[in-house]
Image: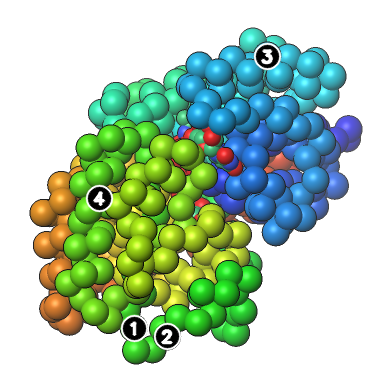
Amino acid sequence: MKPITVMTIFGTRPEAIKMAPLAQELARRPQINALCCVTAQHRQMLDSVLDIFQLKPDFDLDIMELRQTLSTITSKCLLGMEDVLSQAKPDLILVHGDTSTTFAGALAAFYHQIPVGHVEAGLRTYDKWSPFPEEMNRKMVGAIADLHFCPTVANRDNLARENITQNVFLTGNTVIDALKTTVVENFTFGEEVLNRLDYQHKRVILVTCHRRENYGQPMTNIMTALRRVADAFPDVELVYPVHLSPVVQEAAHKYLDNHERIHLIAPLAVDEMHNLMARCHLVMTDSGGLQEEAPALGKPVLVLRKETERPEAVAAGTVKLAGVEEGDIFSMASELLSNQEAYNQMAHAVNPYGDGHACRRIADAIEWHFGLRDAAPDPF
Ligand code: UD1
Ligand code: UDP
């Protein structure tokens, strides 16, 4: 039988981390001609992931601009995909999650009447404005997609509530597949400050913060609370790899510079990030990906947001919503740093998001859908 052509489309750091192991899995399948198109909505932060996973895209739209807007990202992706899809004529395109690249990639495929598979489908907060614009991006992609790859049962149930029940596969999250390849016992960091930290006697708090709905006052509150935490606990070392967004850079440096135990560093390569997470005491973040990775590594997470589309680890007790008010964030962090029992209750490894076999299930489901395999994959 003639192989089918499957094109992965992604553009930002988290999409790349979660699509790289899938792109590799597809490339290993003899019945699949695997193509990869990056929009480069992120540039340096994307290239870093491509390097680690040794992925060489077949197409690169190179769209990133300094301080880009949602409209420029979406329109440049859509126009750029025009030639790519006409030339490559894939049988299926795969997009991931909820970024502007995800939405524009799905829309471009729809305009070309090409089937769409949505990886990490079915996450919802049911708040149109938070996360912004991600909640609407993933809903719109859900409406366009022909195949839906849900990480968890709750994600599948969310789609069912929207009457999406056909071609829905329960796969686990591919981020756990990625995590299995990066964390090792004896890791030497490229970032020198991370080799110098005393992980035995100091408590390292890993911080990230970048979400658009946190721009402005929420980000000010978060940064102020973080500085208070470092001031109040002399054995805390706060490590914050700062996202390259100028808005985030400005906020982080304005409130967190000039403190001997706050380390503002450049974005980390994904293997450095995962190994730092494996060694830290606590994670404070507004990131989606970190909420999935840290529980698998047994690290408590305080989420710097008002809601989350990832309730599974909250239910398992390893993640708590800290909100975006300075006082709330400070008091929740203080509790975990002062009360060993409260800390221990959160610090156990759970894996609600995956078992490391999501990519195999997704590739199997695609082959089954196209008649290249007899059985659908076992659900996660
Ligand atoms: C995007 C996604 C968000 C995701 C996040 C992951 C949208 C609307 N947002 O948000 O869902 O959680 O990525 O990190 O799709 N920049 C660089 N170099 C880089 C990357 C970014 O300089 O490698 C700077 C550029 O000035 C760019 C800005 O960061 O304009 C913002 O990037 P953008 O992709 O628009 O938004 P993110 O906040 O990264
Ligand atoms: N990450 C990384 N280096 C960093 C910060 C994050 O490799 O300096 C990884 C992190 O481990 C996770 C992903 O990037 O896999 C999350 O990306 P981000 O927080 O930018 O986006 P989100 O998940 O919120 O969409």
**On the rendered structure, is 124 left or right of 346?**
right
**On the rendered structure, is 117 left or right of 156?**
right
> To which residue does mark 2 refer?
198
Q: Neighbour class for label 3 at 10 Å: few (<14), some, many (≥20)?
A: few
**On the rendered structure, is 75 left or right of 258?**
right
- Alpha-carbon span between mark 3 and mark 2: 50 Å
Could you tell me residue 378's position as x and y percent? 55, 52
> To which residue does mark 1 refer?
202
Quarter occupied by residue 60 = top right
The residue drawn where x is 60% and y is 38% is 42
**On the rendered structure, is 337 left or right of 205?**
left
Task: Between residue 365 and residue 46, name the one nearer to us.
Answer: 46
> To which residue does mark 4 refer?
222
The residue drawn where x is 71% and y is 19% is 80
Could you tell me residue 373's position as x and y percent? 72, 43
- Alpha-carbon span between mark 2 and mark 1: 6 Å
Disc 3 residue: CB within 8 Å of ligand 1: no
- Alpha-carbon span between mark 4 and mark 3: 37 Å
Could you tell me residue 132's position as x and y percent? 35, 29
